[in-house]
Image (tube, rainbow, N blue to C red):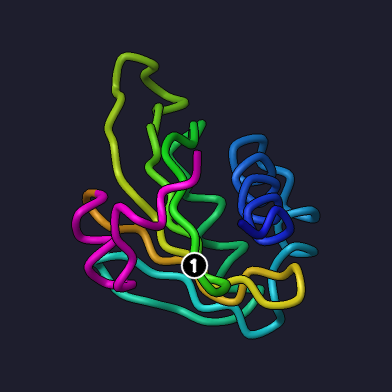
């Protein structure tokens, strides 16, 4: 297990959930790629714009890790309507303690399939 890469992803989530954009940017590479089923974008400006549209708070659940790739299950709670709760999963690539890519998937199965991670990569 690489505690460094996992810690980076957890800190990235904390910064996103608290709208701490300066910390979020500092944890991300200059050319970070961010995306979801709706498309992708690149760079700090795109990350800042994407983060400002964040649904509210994000609670991390299960964590999978292998070779710089971290996949996490997420519970997303709307800031506007706390009863609006949904689940998703995101896949991250971390290099030298910076997130270089973050892609949100509809569910864990899709995130694991996109990264070739499996149950064997689940962290205890």
**Does the magenta segment cover residue 109?**
yes
Q: Nearer the viewer, residue 33 or 7?
A: 7
- Which residue appears at 58% of the width and 67% of the height? 47
Disc 1 packing (10 Å; few <14; some 14–19; many ≥20) = some
Q: Is residue 85 above or below residue 18?
A: above
Tell me the chief SS of the magenta region: helix
Drawn side of residue 14 relative to residue 40, left or right:
right
Q: Nearer the viewer, residue 124 or 86?
A: 124
**Which quadrant is home to the N terminus?**
bottom right
Q: Quadrant of residue 8?
A: bottom right
Q: Is residue 12 above or below residue 95?
A: above
- Which residue appears at 61% of the width and 45% of the height? 16
Drawn side of residue 112 relative to residue 42, left or right:
left
Q: Which residue is mark 1?
A: 66
- Residue 41, given in percent of the width and then of the height, sits at 45, 79
- Which residue appears at 19% of the width and 54% of the height? 109
**Does the magenta segment cover residue 115?**
yes
- Residue 93, given in percent of the width and then of the height, sits at 54, 72
Number of numbered discs on residues: 1
What's the magenta region? 108-124
Label 1 secondary element: strand
Residue that lies at the very extreme toward the top in this rendered image:
83
Drawn side of residue 120 relative to residue 38, left or right:
right
- Which residue appears at 73% of the width and 58% of the height? 4
- Residue 13, given in percent of the width and then of the height, sits at 60, 45
- Residue 43, given in percent of the width and then of the height, sits at 61, 80
């Amino acid at each position: 297990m690489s505690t460094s890469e996992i810690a980076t992803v957890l800190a990235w989530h904390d910064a996103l959930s608290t709208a701490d954009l300066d910390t979020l940017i500092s944890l991300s590479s200059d050319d970070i790629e961010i995306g979801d089923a709706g498309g992708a974008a690149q760079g700090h400006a795109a990350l800042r714009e994407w983060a400002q549209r964040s649904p509210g708070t994000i609670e991390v659940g299960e964590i999978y890790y292998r070779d710089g790739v971290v996949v996490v299950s997420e519970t997303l709670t709307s800031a506007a309507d706390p009863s609006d709760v949904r689940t998703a999963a995101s896949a991250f690539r971390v290099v030298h303690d910076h997130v270089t890519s973050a892609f949100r998937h509809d569910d864990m199965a899709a995130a694991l399939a996109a990264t070739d991670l499996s149950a064997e990569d689940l962290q205890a």
